[in-house]
């Protein structure tokens, strides 16, 4: 609309103005006319200095008259727009057609986006392609993951599982290098599914001064759609772990509607709940709870049942890969005095569980009892004295034990256990814990999530009696889930018996999160379970000294598993994500079949010092059972980091077992999995992304067109200034806008005179 | 001091918790010719002497001169997961007490039966069969961890008990789920009386060695129950 208006007034396309150079072609007559205009201007000023009317009225009339004279003067100097126009049929034009699956979405008057592409670019004698072919030698490409030449309509399948706009533009630019190219035309919905930014491709185009004219196909909002926008899951989890996952839902056209949100573990329903959809345009985060009980690589599918009238149903589900580990994870629990809390925490983890609580309890001065040890030598000299020994555990629980029971080096080791080894540390409340146990100012105090203040201790012999409830942040974590759903869980917390605490904590560290809050008898609130990440690990503080009341209290039924579940979930969180000596990572859990998967591994020695001289090999088992060895090399940049690209062929699961050795001795090994499968990213955020396409056009010097308004494209492309061009001069004095201005000013003068009574 | 009222208000510390059983006790004309019911034997000196020893020897935080006397159906019993019953040979209980003890043991509680002799064990076995029919009392030997939880008691002498003249001393236990790999939920000193030996440990009425041994068993029981 604006474009048409511009053309009506200026007689030329906006791009001619943006590409052209403004000049005057003055002749001798122009200067004579200038002299005449100068005289007329002088006479105007003289005439309006005195006379009828007030000064302000006369100034306004003089200004209008002078403006008319100025326009006439400019026209007498023959203004020109000099522009370089492409010589017909002497230049090439690259046309890129989006061939991805999102083009099948029928959001254009019930027609798929692809129908526009076929209608306008399906054959040389059709629509836009004909208009372009009349002026240029057109090279047509189709693209999804990369651009390939296409010569016939049947090449377009609209089945590509990704849209990599940047890769397509760079590919076409390189293919047409050396030819006189007027520009590129990209027809797409603009949904870029590439991980890499577009910026690099745009820089290449800018360097060659190659403009891209983009045509956006599709609607910028879908009338009716529900989308599972994002699901954040841990990469690995211990078998039997209950996970709380936030599922982000967004929708349009279904405000407030109730839908079913299901979670399937390889086809088995593991969670289902009714949720109310948020308002349109406002994504809502829905906490979902489920337990992973089956070991191995598991694809979890989070889905909302498709609703009637939805334009895209493929975006109603998201998949996430979780490597469920069925292995024993050892926690070291060091308790400083005999107490019931110790016994009941141990009881919460049954024999045969994937968690092993190896405990050391000090029963008297220099007298220890060991439980859950692997052999007679484990912890024989009480708490570990070397990093190798301590770091062999994945997490550490410190009970009611005073800091003075540790040497300075042991305190430092515990701090490094969290910071460098990436372990989990949990300090429990008790008479000898926290500030009351002299931990203030130690290396361990630095890593704890609470602020220890030796000047504000709980008075000896006094206890706080508290009722505990999850905070808002805590309610979104698995550890506080005591019921089948959010409501049941909240009800359970409200009925739990009170506990006592003997440690006063007034403040938590700035980066810490309070998950459980206690209310004491004076209604004051005290943080009870606090969490923070520290370095590579995480730390927790749990203040109550008798959570076993949640098991023993007379109000608790014998078969109530509240206490057990709480501790299992907390201890599982404690070991969750704790790295091994060989820790694998994948840049993405899924690659397109045929593409390479980038596998990295962090390799450290038993004291978790990075190794750069290890021999690291990935043994890859493909879906068809073939096994290949891929050596991994140190990346030369990050200490201890090795990487390799694993090629894929057939779709399916790939298993990579990474073995690291050093000087002939094994450092460790790890197994990870990834999938080669077509992605479904095309259906997410599947609206037409005008912003992306506009950015490509604007930054490269091209223009963005809506699919419904492309009539000027072919003409506009003539004025890119690239390729074989000839110079065109466009006279501007006879633009309609000049006439309108003159007539307008004359009318304004006459009208003003009428209004002020000077006519 | 009224022994029927609880006195150690729970604050996280260990309190000696003596079980009061009844009816069946005639306080006015006790069948033993004294005004003390069987469950109260050796109270309070045994209890407080034992607490002092526990406190001195171990890092366990305890009340020193306060204890609790609770019935099996008292909700406060749940705050003290180790209980002591004297003279179980005269123990009878109502349904509420039965349910209270059963729940207590299933949830993680532990009970010590002491001070009984001769055929008193028969009543104990009958009563505990009512409470926990899943498992009977079994005889323990010196290899059991309960005898090594603090002191190393490497031999159990059947003639060492306070009532050895009434029969061999034996240490009987009930395993959770009747599974010897699991914890003991109860221990009984048949033909023995640790409480008596604790009570008079400061008087010279009983040999020091016997008192010492009695303390060792008591400390081990508590340490075991605190850790298993």
Image (tube, helix red, strand yellow):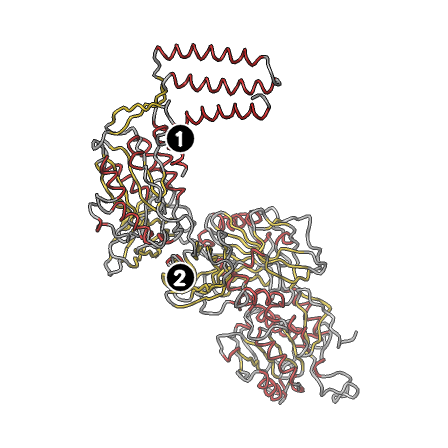
Could you tell me which residue is drawn at 78 percent across and 84 percent down? B35
Q: Nearer the viewer, mark 1 or mark 2?
A: 1
**B52 horizontally vs A662: left or right:** right
Classify 10 Å Cα crowding around label 1: few (below 14), some (14-19), many (20 and above).
some
Q: Which residue is mark 2?
A: A301
Numbered disc 2: secondary structure: strand
Image height check: is A2 above or below B166? Answer: above
**Residue A157 got which mark?**
none
Quadrant in the picture for the N terminus of chain A: top left
Could you tell me which residue is drawn at 69 percent across and 50 percent down? A456
- Asked if residue A667 can be seen in this view, the reply is no
Q: Nearer the viewer, residue A442 or A250?
A: A250
Q: Nearer the viewer, residue B158 or A420?
A: A420
Q: Which residue is mark 1?
A: A9
Residue A306 drawn at (x, y percent): 41, 62
Total marks shown come to 2
Chain containing mark 1: A
């Amino acid at each position: 609309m604006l474009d048409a208006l511009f053309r009506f007034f200026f007689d030329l396309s906006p791009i001619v103005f943006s590409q052209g150079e403004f000049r005057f072609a003055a002749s001798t007559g122009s200067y004579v006319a200038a002299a005449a205009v100068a005289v007329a201007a002088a006479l105007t000023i003289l005439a309006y200095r005195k006379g009828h009317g007030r000064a302000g009225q006369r100034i306004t009339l003089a200004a209008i008259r002078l403006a008319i004279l100025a326009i006439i003067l400019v026209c007498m100097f023959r203004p020109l727009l000099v522009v370089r126009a492409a010589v017909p049929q002497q230049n090439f034009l690259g046309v890129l057609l989006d061939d991805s699956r999102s083009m099948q979405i029928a959001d254009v008057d019930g027609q798929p986006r692809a129908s526009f592409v076929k209608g306008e670019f399906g054959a040389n004698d059709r629509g836009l392609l004909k208009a372009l072919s009349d002026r240029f030698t057109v090279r047509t490409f189709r693209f999804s993951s990369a651009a390939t030449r296409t010569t016939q309509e049947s090449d377009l399948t609209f089945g590509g599982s990704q849209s990599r706009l940047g890769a397509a533009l760079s590919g076409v630019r390189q293919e047409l290098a050396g030819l006189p190219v007027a520009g590129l035309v990209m027809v797409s919905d603009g949904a870029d599914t590439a991980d890499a930014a577009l910026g690099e491709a745009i820089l290449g185009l800018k360097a060659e001064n190659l403009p891209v004219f983009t045509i956006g196909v599709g609607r910028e909002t879908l009338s009716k759609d529900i989308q599972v926008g994002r699901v954040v899951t841990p990469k690995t989890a211990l078998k039997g772990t209950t996970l709380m996952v936030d599922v982000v839902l967004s929708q349009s056209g279904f405000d407030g509607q109730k839908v079913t949100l299901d979670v399937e573990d390889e086809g088995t329903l593991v969670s289902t709940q009714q949720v109310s959809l948020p308002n349109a345009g406002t994504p809502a985060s829905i906490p979902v709870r489920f337990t992973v009980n089956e070991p191995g690589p598991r694809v979890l599918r989070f889905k909302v049942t498709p609703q009637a009238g939805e334009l895209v149903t493929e975006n109603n589900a998201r998949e996430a890969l979780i490597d469920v580990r069925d292995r024993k994870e050892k926690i070291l629990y060091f308790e400083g005095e005999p107490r019931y809390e110790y016994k009941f925490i141990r009881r919460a983890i049954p024999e045969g569980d994937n968690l092993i609580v190896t405990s050391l309890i000090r029963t008297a001065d220099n007298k220890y009892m060991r439980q859950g040890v692997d052999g007679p030598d484990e912890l024989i000299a009480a708490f570990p004295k070397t990093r190798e020994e301590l770091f062999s555990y994945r997490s550490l629980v410190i009970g009611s034990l005073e800091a003075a029971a540790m040497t300075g080096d042991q305190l430092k080791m515990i701090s490094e256990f969290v910071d460098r080894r990436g372990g989990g540390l949990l300090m429990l409340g008790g008479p000898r814990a926290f500030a009351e146990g002299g931990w203030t100012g130690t290396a361990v105090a630095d890593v704890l999530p609470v602020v220890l203040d030796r000047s504000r201790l709980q008075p000896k012999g006094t206890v706080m009696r508290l009722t505990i409830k999850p905070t808002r942040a805590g309610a979104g974590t698995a550890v506080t889930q005591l019921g089948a759903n959010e409501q049941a869980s909240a009800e359970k917390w409200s009925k739990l018996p009170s506990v006592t605490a003997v440690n006063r904590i007034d403040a938590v560290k700035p980066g810490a999160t309070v998950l459980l809050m206690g209310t004491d008898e004076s209604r004051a609130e005290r943080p009870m379970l606090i969490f923070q990440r520290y370095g590579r690990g995480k730390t927790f503080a749990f203040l109550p000294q008798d959570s076993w009341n949640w098991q023993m209290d007379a109000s608790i039924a014998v078969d109530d598993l509240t206490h057990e579940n709480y501790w299992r979930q907390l201890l599982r969180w404690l070991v969750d994500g704790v790295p091994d000596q060989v820790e694998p990572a994948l840049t993405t859990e899924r690659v397109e079949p045929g593409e390479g998967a980038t596998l990295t591994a962090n390799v450290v020695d038993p004291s978790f010092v990075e190794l750069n001289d290890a021999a690291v090999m990935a043994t890859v088992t493909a879906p068809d059972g073939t096994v290949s060895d891929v050596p991994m090399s140190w990346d030369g940049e990050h200490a201890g980091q090795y990487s390799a690209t694993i090629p894929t062929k057939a779709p399916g699961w790939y298993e990579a077992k990474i073995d690291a050795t050093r000087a002939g001795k094994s450092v460790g090994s790890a197994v990870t999995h990834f999938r080669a499968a077509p992605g479904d990213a095309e259906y997410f955020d599947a609206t037409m992304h005008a912003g992306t396409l506009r950015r490509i056009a604007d930054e490269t010097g091209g223009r963005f067109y809506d699919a419904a308004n492309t009539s000027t494209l072919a003409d506009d492309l003539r004025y890119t200034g690239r390729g074989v061009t000839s110079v065109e001069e466009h006279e501007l004095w006879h633009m309609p806008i000049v006439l309108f201005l003159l007539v307008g000013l004359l009318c304004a003068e006459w009208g003003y005179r009428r209004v002020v009574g000077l006519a | 001091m009224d022994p029927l009222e609880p006195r150690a208000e729970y604050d996280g510390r260990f309190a000696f918790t003596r079980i009061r059983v009844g009816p069946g006790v005639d306080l006015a004309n006790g069948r033993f010719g004294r005004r003390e019911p069987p469950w109260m034997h050796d109270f309070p000196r045994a209890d407080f002497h034992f607490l002092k020893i526990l406190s001195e020897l171990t890092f366990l935080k305890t009340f020193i001169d306060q204890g609790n006397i609770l019935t099996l159906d008292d909700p406060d019993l749940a705050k003290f997961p180790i209980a002591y019953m004297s003279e179980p040979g005269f123990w009878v209980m109502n349904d509420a007490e039965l349910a209270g003890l059963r729940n207590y043991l299933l949830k993680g509680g532990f009970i010590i039966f002491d001070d009984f002799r001769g055929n008193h064990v028969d009543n104990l076995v009958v009563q505990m069969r009512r409470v926990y029919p899943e498992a009977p009392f079994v005889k323990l030997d010196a290899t059991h961890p309960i005898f090594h939880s603090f002191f190393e008691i490497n031999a159990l002498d059947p003639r060492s008990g306070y009532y050895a003249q009434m029969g061999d001393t034996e240490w009987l236990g009930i395993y959770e789920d009747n599974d010897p790999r699991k914890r003991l939920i109860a221990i009984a000193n048949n033909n023995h009386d640790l409480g008596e030996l604790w009570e008079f440990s400061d008087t010279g009425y009983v040999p020091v060695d016997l008192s010492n041994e009695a303390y060792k068993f008591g400390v081990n029981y508590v340490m075991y129950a605190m850790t298993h």
